Image (cartoon, grey):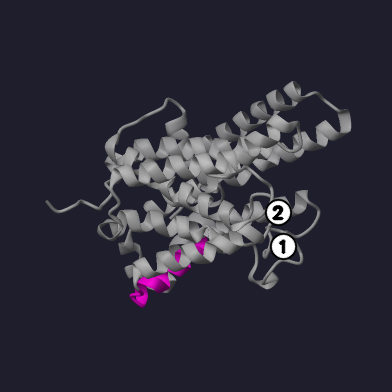
Amino acid sequence: MQQNTSLAPSVWNETLNAIKAILIFLVVIGHLMSGGNELTRLIKEVLSGFRMPLFFGISGFLIKKALFTASASELGNKYYHRIIIPYALAFIVYSIVNLSIINPLYPSNHMWFIPAFLLMIVYIFFIERFNINRLAVLIFAAIFTMPWLAFVHPGSGDEIAYYLGDKRYYYYFVFFYFGYMLRNYSEKLYIPKFIYIFILMTSGYLLFVNNTSAANYLYSINSLLFNLSLILVVIKFAQKYTSLKIPIISDLGSYTLPIYLWHMLPLFLMWKIRDTYHINGFIYLFSYFILLSLLIYIIVKSKDTLFGKIFITGAHK
């Protein structure tokens, strides 16, 4: 029987929207946990170990290879309206809030994600245009990822190849491309279920028992294997349970871009209030989630306005 590698948006959106929304809120929680006690730092470290690799994997899975039959100008125009304009507005606002222009090589806080995503679209555009061996690209990306993951830290002024920019522009590509291949070239990635489940459990256990802040290849290999197998497990889950819907959460999955871009704005405000008035943790968290809820309400309501379509949701074109 021929394997169906296509994604039917009308069938798959419920599950994927729920997963994307959950991951965005894990990002929010991670950003909330600045400083804190040992437990807070542990939770933040655990979340940072998988949330963005998984988000990139799902993002890659949502990309059809038919997209790259368009010309470079057509592809650029598509993302200009959907992503670049909303990002440009956020870039300007956060530059004003920070009272300095954000460094495009090393964007502060969360602003690195959109440049990384767009760069990965460019990478795949050239891979498809020049018909480069897809499996070889995936293997090369995995090998390339490990030393960056092990030894190079984002934002440090003395890191390797400084002018190549934030390492996340490159090392997350293996997860993005793995998701892309699972959708478009799954016949090249057949892995028996018991193998990827075993890899997930084993690498996850090794990451847990060998938890260390010291950068090393053992950590990078375990992290790479854990996240690739996790992406596979989650996508297989989404393929099996196609209509998973979580009230409210699933609906917010359609707004992951604006929520991601703007969730730091109320957080900057709360940091300022916390540092000025020394409010306790409960009031800090409660106040932030009230502001975040208001922000999400504005985002959802803006989808039917011209300003919202152009600058917030990117749905104008």
Q: Secondary structure at mark 2?
A: loop
Q: Which residue is mark 2?
A: 108
Q: Quadrant of residue 166?
A: bottom right
Question: In the drawing, does residue 10 fall left or right of residue 307?
Answer: left
Residue 224 screen position, x and y as percent: 50, 53
Numbered range of the magenta stretch: 118-132
Under mark 2, the amino acid is Ser
**Between marks 2 and 1, how big is the CA–CA gap?**
7 Å
Under mark 1, the amino acid is Asn
Residue 22 screen position, x and y as percent: 49, 35
The image's mark for residue 103 is: 1
Residue 248 screen position, x and y as percent: 46, 27
Q: Secondary structure at mark 1?
A: loop
Residue in front for this viewpoint, 222 or 49:
222
Q: Residue at horizontal 41%, vertical 73%?
A: 126
Residue furthest to the bottom in view is 130
Tag 2 and tag 1, C-beta contact below 8 Å = yes
Q: Is residue 248 above or below residue 109?
A: above
The image's mark for residue 271 is: none
Question: In the drawing, does residue 104 fall left or right of residue 254?
Answer: right
